[in-house]
Image (tube, grey):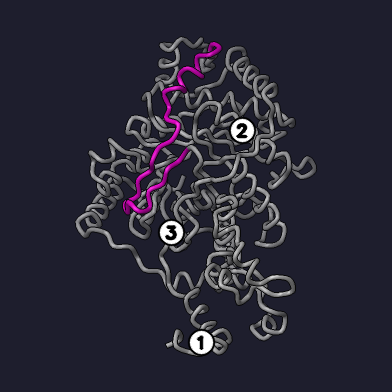
Amino acid sequence: MAETAPRARRARGGGGAARRAERTTVSFDTAKYIERNIPNFEILNEEALQIIEANAEQILEEVGVNFVNNQAALDRWRDAGAMIEGERVRIPKGLARRLCKTAPSSYTQHARNPERNVVIGGNTLVCAPVYGPPFVRDAEGGRRYATMDDFNKFVKLGYMSKWLHHSGGTVCEPTDIAVNKRHLDMLHAHMTLSDKPFMGSVTEPSRAQDSVEMCEILFGKDFVQENTVMTSLININSPMTFDDVMMGAMEIYAQNNQACIISPFIVGGAMAPVSVAGTLTQVLAEVLAGIAYSQLVKPGAPVIFGAFVSSIDMNSGAPTFGTPEASHILYGAGQLARRLGLPFRSGGSLCGSKLPDAQAAYETAHTHNAALLGGVNFMLHACGWLEGGLVSSFEKFVMDADQLGILHHLAKGVAVDENAQAMDAIREVGPGGHYLGCAHTQANFKEAFWRTDVFDYKPFETWQDDGARDTQALASARVQQMLANYRQPALDPGIAEGLKDYINAKKASMPDAFI
């Protein structure tokens, strides 16, 4: 009907209503992972890179790293040619780098819906949500301990978020479920409430094994052994310490062909030097040792060069985010990862603010942009992070997820094909005219400009009539709208039953533990 209406009336009435309805229609679309068509920003010259690389090798050989409570790791290193003294491992120059050469430069993580598969490495950027906070915050309930219901809501929001490619892992820590059992419920939520790829449990090696076994139910045992279906986070206890829990989980995943992010967890000035070059040296040394060890466990196991880095406020001791020093380190670490031929993880919606306010937005925007320009391939914490990682915020989740669309559009670069040159439009309009009604605008306006699903672009009077809502209020309404529109993706009933039976049997096999 609208197409038969007069042109002028359609522009002012029915057409606008139709476009507004189109923007509010329930959609389960997920954008493909980002493929950059822009260059990476390289902050370090060749001389600086060579200095950092040489210093990292010197640290590994002279200072060494600790592998604690892990005799099997010490034995592997000894057999590979490292010097072992107690739990200290000193790695001869060149050994770690040689071992890292068997790690793939990119890999595909499979989702249960093949359309959601992601490629991690090369020119790609895969965005995953916040990971790890014990608290949640929303406009109605304020700050509180997270529950499994909160966890499920975040998974649903992630599934509904167009620009988010990955369901993530511990989007919040459900404190109402026993510590030794909650990983089962969290994995089940990712497997059933979403069909995007997800992360496995790393809080104890047996929980990593449970993750593998649940994936074997979801995907099939042979498929899991032949393909990567999980990417999981292995944090290094900086400075230069590899604990048995994280290494035990990594060993399980490597043995089963599942990917691990080997990531130093650094607060500059506390767990690493205050200087950018010194921190990059330590980051590289730690990553070389960690990835080399993964390849000792299983050559060819997929890994990601990780770098989670913040600085410290020397007055309060609190970590700071979105700082220029953090961006310097991200850019430099990205160069070091590319020289090793490895995928790179860094960035995120990192901020120290207690609320989804201007501080949170500034700090997040700085880190988002650095991640895009710095060649990050896997961006954990891409949306929802608040209060230095202590809080998962519902409002900030949808605000950040919306802004990830900007990164997609920036990464496209600038088209210069015949349509983009717009020569016919310039000729049609000529001097003194306007482009609103010209053929080129009519043909391209829907896709020409990125448009937010959260922010307000209305004139002041309309905004005031609509309740004068600020961004947090708009985001709160968006959360409720998305959850109301959520529809669970279909799953084979036999697989669903198999997962339930596995979880029930596992839970029945052990008493609850909250430590």
Q: Which residue is identified by label 2?
A: 333
The residue at 41%/11% (across/down) is 79
Foreground mark, 3 or 1, reads: 1
Q: Position of residue 134 (x, y in %)?
A: 54, 53
- Residue 286 is at least partly visible in this image: yes
Q: Mark 2 to mark 1: distance in Å?
A: 52 Å
Residue 14's disc number: 1
Q: Mark 3 to mark 2: distance in Å?
A: 29 Å
Where is 277 relative to 353, above or below? Answer: above
Q: Which residue is identified by label 3?
A: 30
Q: Position of residue 240 (x, y in %)?
A: 58, 25
Residue lying farthest to the right in this orientation? 315
As for residue 120 lying within the magenta part, the answer is yes
The residue at 61%/67% (across/down) is 425
Indicate the secondary structure of the residue bearing disc 1: helix
Q: Quadrant of residue 9?
A: bottom right
Indicate the secondary structure of the residue bearing disc 2: helix
Q: Amino acid at mark 1?
A: Gly
363 to the left or right of 248: right
80 or 148: which is nearer to us? 80
Where is 381 relative to 329, above or below? Answer: below
125 or 314: which is nearer to us? 125
Q: Residues within 10 Å of mark 1 (few under 14, many from 20)?
A: some
Q: Position of residue 406 (x, y in %)?
A: 59, 57
Q: Mark 3 to mark 1: distance in Å?
A: 28 Å
The residue at 36%/25% (across/down) is 298
Q: Amino acid at mark 3?
A: Thr
Which residues are drawn in magenta? 92-121
Q: Of callouts 3 and 2, which one flags the residue occurring earlier in the amino acid sequence?
A: 3
Q: Position of residue 146 (x, y in %)?
A: 51, 58
Are the two marked residues, 3 and 1, in contact with CB atoms closer than 8 angstroms? no
